[in-house]
Image (tube, grey):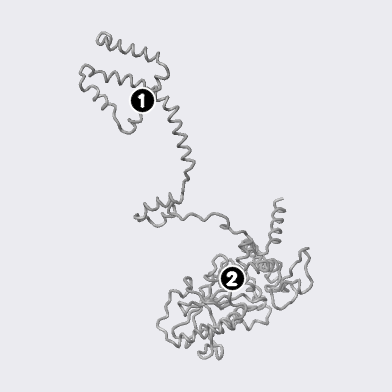
């Protein structure tokens, strides 16, 4: 149909095609260059229709030629596309790869730009923690993580330099933090400062105190349980508040019990019963004296009179049975229960150390952990609570001299089994103590081990025992 309608064009196309096939490579290169130039122009936004319109504007006979030219051009374009892809696009990919190799992705900068987009958004609380670009990047590099030896050194240093008396800024977890005292005067301030000086100067080695600079009415003290008592090596915390009428009235004291009552004078609710505090009856020097009584006197009285060798007789009326067999038996059983509560208090302090005493708690139980665990094993054998605990040397031999004995008492007496008549039911009570003590021993061993106490031998014994049981 095309040959009948357009004989001249068909012949022209045929001769042109023959000449193109016979053309040398030198003739092809300019054509290829022209086609590549046209592709670049199309990429730059130029239109081939504009060129066609301008060339046929004054030639109406060739008005239908663009359709044929477009067909031929489509074939050339397809052929040229693969040629262009092999030579040009491949080179472009290499360039892109080189550029990508030189470009480094900055995640911090990227996250910061994303975070900037969220500056005007009010995200719900907690959502920020789940959005990576809103989190602060973790510090990386050498020195970020400390070794076990470095952590041990830090604990030892903080414990070694822990002052017996010191001031702190605030007590957010103090029992009386939310209890204002009202208006006070200069005399009140002077008297508090006088008490502070006495505490700083005359505190016993086993008592530590912190007072608040912002709230002079607040004070926190911890005392180490005396040796030879069921409280030995324990830490016992007390919060005190100087009332607005101090020193006309004694301070108010709260014991951190953890819900345990380990003494007739220390209630599970935290109440401290002491004549000096006006919370129990008394006479003469037992009562508070505004001219002579001090906070130092209160702390020493709690340690000496409350945390004693046989707290069972602190209960009013029980002291009359101190010399009877039944009274001694009851006191012994009370000590077993008290030591269990003391161990539970240790766990309570280790897991929730009161504010400003974290270093003391960690260092103290790191230092005394092994002695406490040895005492636990010693008592499970039936020895009296608070008695001397022998320490084995590296060869596993028990020492015979006083130097080879790690005392849990201040008496220096050799360890002895209690001489109670087991037929009276004491054996049943002792079995109950052993059952509870085994559980607490495992808990204490784990906590002391985490704090870095010398528990290797005890851990090895436990591992050997477990292996034997499994076999």
Foreground residue among 69 and 447 = 69
Q: Is residue 113 above or below residue 300?
A: above
Q: Which residue is mark 1?
A: 34
**How many C-alpha atoms fall within 10 Å of the one at disc 2: few (<14), some, or many (≥20)?**
many
Q: Is residue 435 visible?
A: no
Q: Nearer the viewer, residue 203 or 146?
A: 146
145, 22: nearer the viewer: 22
Residue 72 point in image, percent of width and height? 33, 19
Name above or below for residue 386 compared with residue 196: above
In the picture, measured across the screen, residue 132 lies left or right of residue 207, that is: left
Instruction: Provide residue 261's location: percent of width, then percent of height.
Output: 56, 73
Residue position for label 2: 360
Mark 1 lies on a secondary structure that is helix
Local crowd size for mark 1, using a 10 Å CA cut-off: few (<14), some (14–19), many (≥20): few
Q: Is residue 168 above or below residue 450?
A: below
Q: Quadrant of the N terminus?
A: top left
How far, Cα to Cα, is label 2 from label 1?
A: 87 Å
Q: Earlier in the sequence, mark 2 or mark 1?
A: 1
């Amino acid at each position: 149909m095309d040959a009948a309608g357009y004989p001249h064009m068909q012949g022209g196309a045929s001769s042109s095609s023959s000449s193109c096939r016979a053309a040398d490579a030198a003739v092809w290169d300019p054509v290829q260059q022209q086609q590549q130039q046209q592709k670049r122009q199309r990429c730059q936004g130029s239109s081939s229709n504009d060129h066609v319109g301008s060339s046929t504007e004054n030639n109406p006979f060739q008005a239908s030629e663009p359709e044929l030219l477009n067909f031929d051009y489509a074939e050339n374009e397809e052929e040229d596309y693969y040629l262009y892809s092999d030579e040009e696009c491949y080179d472009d990919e290499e360039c892109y790869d080189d550029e990508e190799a030189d470009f480094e992705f900055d995640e911090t900068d990227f996250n910061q730009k994303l975070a900037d987009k969220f500056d005007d958004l009010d995200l719900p609380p907690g959502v920020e923690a789940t959005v990576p670009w809103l989190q602060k990047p973790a510090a990386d590099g050498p020195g970020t993580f400390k070794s076990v030896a470095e952590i041990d050194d830090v604990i030892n240093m903080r414990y070694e330099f822990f002052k017996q008396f010191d001031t702190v800024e605030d007590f957010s977890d103090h029992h009386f933090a939310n209890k204002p005292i009202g208006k006070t005067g200069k005399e009140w301030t002077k008297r508090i400062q006088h008490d502070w000086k006495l505490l700083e100067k005359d505190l016993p080695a086993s008592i530590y105190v912190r007072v608040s600079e912002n709230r002079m009415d607040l004070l926190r003290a911890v005392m180490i349980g005396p040796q030879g008592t069921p409280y030995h090596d324990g830490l016992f915390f007390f919060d005190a508040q100087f009332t607005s009428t101090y020193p006309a009235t004694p301070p108010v004291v709260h014991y951190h019990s953890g819900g345990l009552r380990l003494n007739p004078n220390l209630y599970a609710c935290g109440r401290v019963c002491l004549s000096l505090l006006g919370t129990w009856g008394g006479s003469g020097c037992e009562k508070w004296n505004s001219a002579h009584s001090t906070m130092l006197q209160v702390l020493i009285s709690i340690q000496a009179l409350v945390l004693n060798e046989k707290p069972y007789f602190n209960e009013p009326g029980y002291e009359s049975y101190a010399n009877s067999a039944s009274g001694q038996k009851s006191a012994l059983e009370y000590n077993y229960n008290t030591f269990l509560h003391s161990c539970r208090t240790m766990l309570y302090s280790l897991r929730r150390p009161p504010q400003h005493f974290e270093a003391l708690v960690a260092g103290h139980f790191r230092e005394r952990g092994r002695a406490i665990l040895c005492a636990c094993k010693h008592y499970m054998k039936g020895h009296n609570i608070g008695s001397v605990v022998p320490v084995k040397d590296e060869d596993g031999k028990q020492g015979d001299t006083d130097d080879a004995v790690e005392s849990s008492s201040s008496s220096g007496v050799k360890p002895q089994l209690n001489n109670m008549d087991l037929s009276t039911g004491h054996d049943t009570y002792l079995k109950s103590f052993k059952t509870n003590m085994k559980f607490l021993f495992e808990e204490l061993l784990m906590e002391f081990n985490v704090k870095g106490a010398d528990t290797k031998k005890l851990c090895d014994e436990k591992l050997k025992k477990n292996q034997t049981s499994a076999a």
